[in-house]
Amino acid sequence: MKELIEYIAKALVDNPDEVKVNEIEGERTSVIELSVAKEDLGKVIGKQGRTARSIRTILSAASTKNNKRAVLEIIE
């Protein structure tokens, strides 16, 4: 999951070197923390949160395949 989010985020931003993804795994749930450069935050969130919602949808579909739940946190 971590690699998937990292790949998507790096494709969206202007500074791909500053993309940091941290995964905290629990028994049933994984929390994925995404951190990007301050000027790229709007690109990851998108208008009215559409891009972030789309990334969460992809993450949800991928995590269902592993019988786990994944939550994306975008850190400012």
Image (tube, rainbow, N blue to C red):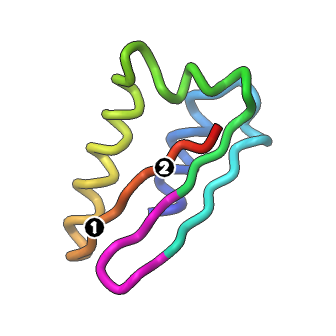
Displayed quadrant of residue 52: top left
Q: Where does the image place residue 46, in percent across and percent down from the top left?
A: 45, 19
49 or 16: nearer the eye?
Answer: 49
Q: Residue at coordinates 53% horizontally, 43% vertically from top-left?
A: 74
Q: Secondary structure at mark 2?
A: strand
Q: Secondary structure at mark 1?
A: strand
Q: Residue at coordinates 26% horizontally, 54% vertically from top-left?
A: 60
Going by the picture, which residue comes out furthest to the bottom?
27
Q: Is residue 17 above or below residue 44?
A: below
Task: Judge from the rendering whether residue 32 lies leftward or rightward of residue 61; answer left or right.
Answer: right
- Whole-angstrom CA distance, mark 1 to mark 2, is 13 Å
Three-letter code, disc 2? Glu
**Crowd rating for badge 1 (residues with CA inside 10 Å; few <14, some 14–19, many 20+):** some
Q: Which mark is residue 69?
A: 1
17 or 56: nearer the eye?
Answer: 56
Q: Is residue 46 above or below residue 27?
A: above
Which region is colored magenta? 25-32
Q: Where does the image place residue 36, in percent across and percent down from the top left?
A: 68, 38
